[in-house]
Image: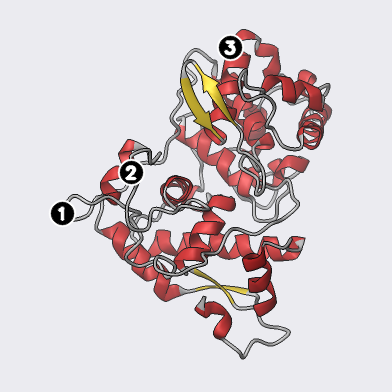
Amino acid sequence: MDGVSMATQTANSPAVAVDPDACRRVAEILRSHSIPEDREDTSLTGLTPPQIGNFYLLLVAISHQTSPLGRKPLEGTIDGLRRVGWDYLSAKLEAAVRKNPVFLTPSFWETVKGEDLQRLFSDTNLGDRLSDPEGRADLIRDLGHRMSIKSWASADDLFCKSDGYIERADNGLLELLGQFRAYSDPVRKKSYFFLALMHNTGLWKYNDPENLGAPVDYHEARGHLRLGTVRVLSPELHAKLVEQRQVTAAEDIEIRQSVHNALMLISEMSGLRNPSQVHYLFWNVFRSCCTRQSPHCHACPPNCGLPARYVPLALFPGGERRCPFSDVCQSANLEPKLLEQRAITDYY
């Protein structure tokens, strides 16, 4: 990777940086296509607005590392359909709350144990694959406890407290969410994701939508490190990524903050000016096409999981189908390709 060939790095230099030229090349691709609106593939039909808010507040709080490095991904079959990662987590929780809506109450969250989550997200055939169930349960208990202290029964209470502002001097949604351990990430991955979900469902409309940043998870870190929109300037950090050694908390945050900055820049350069819409595009492409071991740089296999609404971006002249960004990706013809950072965290 040419990022580490920059030998002039000093002790005060950043370890990671955004490459504006690479961002511009990616933005030009987005300019030449119609980009789907950001949305989830579930409607939660039949749930009340407060229930939907609590569903996403809970789901996002526990949604991190569904495909952890070195472990089998969280997956299973629901209603005859195989689902993986976030899709499985969401569908499994939805099935549970339809049977027992008490799962969506802060008073219940205060009592959750790791074994409860293992049982909830276990698959009949594949068994228990949820990583760190007790750590996740601790986040949920904290969420329920702090909601109860504030006498908040639903996520709508946070929205009312904020007067619909994502950021403001006092009681903006980011500040209110940041009181929960699950949402305390300085890069605000879960906070931005939750706020995007509430907007995309049509339940919340913000007075300052320009402050809705892009959530960054490990799929996007991997994808942007490979694209070159984000470059690793530190030889030491680059070696950690190549050798898959654990990075520090500060290094993890610096990588994800740089990816966030790259997403914001691409959103502006592309003319979309919608970081959430850009995030959904990258997230779906990276988790479907820019996989860890078999990325679709030159051809998508028949079982490529890219959602149908994004497939037109992956179609090239002559009918070939491959990663939409393969023509501008610095890693398309290079081996080994970088993987996302190894980090012990519950921020994402």
Q: Residues within 10 Å of mark 3 (few under 14, many from 20)?
A: few
Mark 1 residue type: Gly
Left or right for 144, reference 177:
right
Residue 287 x, y percent position in the rendering: 48, 46
Asked whether residue 125 is in view, the answer is yes
Residue 142 x, y percent position in the rendering: 81, 34
Which residue is depicted at the point 38% across and 41% down? 304
Assign a secondary structure to mark 1.
loop
The numbered mark, 1 or 3, whose residue comes first in the sequence reads: 3
Residue 169 x, y percent position in the rendering: 68, 53
Which residue is depicted at the point 55% across and 64% down? 338
Left or right for 274, reference 105:
left
Q: Does 291 appear above or below 72?
A: below
Which residue has dot 3 on it?
98
Mark 3 residue type: Arg
Asked whether residue 106 is in view, the answer is no
Left or right for 207, reference 135:
left
Mark 2 or 3, closer to the camera: 2
Which residue has dot 2 on it?
310
Q: Residues within 10 Å of mark 1 (few under 14, many from 20)?
A: few
Residue 318 is tagged as: 1
Residue furthest bottom as drawn: 8
Q: Quadrant of residue 301?
A: top left
- Comparing 107 with 175, the one in front is 107
Residue 269 x, y percent position in the rendering: 37, 65
The numbered mark, 2 or 1, whose residue comes first in the sequence reads: 2
Q: Does 106 appear above or below 99?
A: below
Mark 2 residue type: Tyr
Estimate the spatial distance between the alpha carbons at disc 2 and disc 3, rounded to whole Å: 30 Å
Residue 26 is tagged as: none
